[in-house]
Amino acid sequence: MTSFEDVYALPDPRGYFAALGPYAYQTPGHAQPVFRALAAELGPGRRTVLDICCSYGINSALLNHDVTLDELFAHYTSAAVAGLTTAALTDLDRDFYAARRRSDAVRAIGIDVSQPALDYAVAVGLLDDGYCLNLERTEPTERLRDSLAGTGLITITGGTSFLTGRTFARLFTAIGHPVPVAAFVLRTHDYGPISACLHSYGLTVERDADTHRQRRFTDPREQQRAVATVTALDEDPAGKESTGYFHTRLHLAR
């Protein structure tokens, strides 16, 4: 896949939305109603949602606020914010999200490898706590272990391609028990090994029959590679990757 790594290391999300907008990136929008429905099922004492690979807190923005992904794209690519400093944008966004906060908002924690993205998400109120960690390489910190108390749901809309069961095993150990995991997984990624890990903790993984567009391909070579990969994974690219888009599928473990 074409790398967009640079846009995750900026001090605010304007570069992220400017870079992904031309390719119609949409997975968090598809996840929004799913994550809200799952969060609504959380009982007392478990109303914390952990978002893995959270970047600028986009999933938390959509989960806990009356805003759509299209509105976020419009906001962060508008002329009104183009000339602002990051500090000024942070002040603006703190009020922007506070005015749209839902009455059923849950506590949100994020884990990512980008400290600037986490700092922004915490500063504007999208995350209650943010942790710059790579759990493939390191154990959860004591601070993260304390923060995970009350976690009832783990979400992820990007990044499963970089993860193994190791991350989830470490999280379950830190939480003290397995919790549901809702992951939107690219069809170019074999989620089988992670599913096996989740199953070993007593979770049943439901694989949605439907798929959702993730983003347009950046060029024909990226499309060709994606078509070849999904075919090798015994998926049919017809009507999906063949039409010019990566596709994701929801895998829900509970």
Image (cartoon, helix red, strand yellow):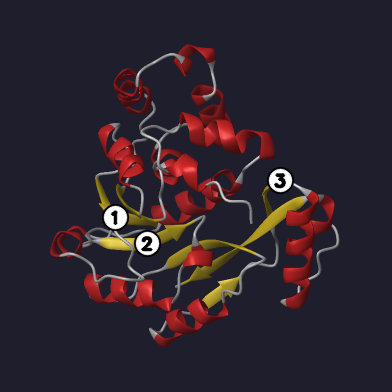
Circle 1 residue: 48
Asked whether residue 234 is in view, the answer is: no
Q: Residues within 10 Å of mark 1 (few under 14, many from 20)?
A: many
Q: Is residue 204 above or below residue 44?
A: below
Disc 2 from disc 3: Cα separation: 33 Å
User: What residue do we see at 53% from left, 53% from top?
Assistant: 34
Where residue 166 sits in the image (x, y, percent)?
Answer: 37, 77
Q: Residues within 10 Å of mark 2 (few under 14, many from 20)?
A: many
Circle 3 residue: 218
Q: Is residue 254 left or right of residue 25?
A: left
Q: Nearer the viewer, mark 2 or mark 3?
A: 3
Residues 29 and 162: in front is 162
Asked whether residue 159 is in view, the answer is: yes
Kind of residue indicated by mark 2:
Leu
Kindly indicate whether the residue at mark 1 contacts the one at mark 2 (C-beta within 8 angstroms). yes
User: What residue do we see at 81% from left, 69% from top?
Assistant: 236
Where residue 253 sits in the image (x, y, percent)?
Answer: 48, 72
Circle 2 residue: 153
Secondary structure at badge 2 equals strand
Query: On residue 81, which mark appears?
Result: none
Q: Give the image quarter of residue 83.
A: top left
Q: Give the image quarter of residue 38.
A: bottom left
Disc 3 from disc 1: Cα separation: 36 Å
Secondary structure at badge 1 equals strand
Residues 97 and 215: in front is 215
Q: Earlier in the sequence, mark 3 or mark 1?
A: 1
Quadrant of the drawing holding the C terminus: bottom left
Kind of residue indicated by mark 1:
Thr
Where residue 179 sits in the image (x, y, percent)?
Answer: 35, 70
Quadrant of the drawing holding the N terminus: bottom right
Kindly indicate whether the residue at mark 3 contacts the one at mark 2 (C-beta within 8 angstroms). no
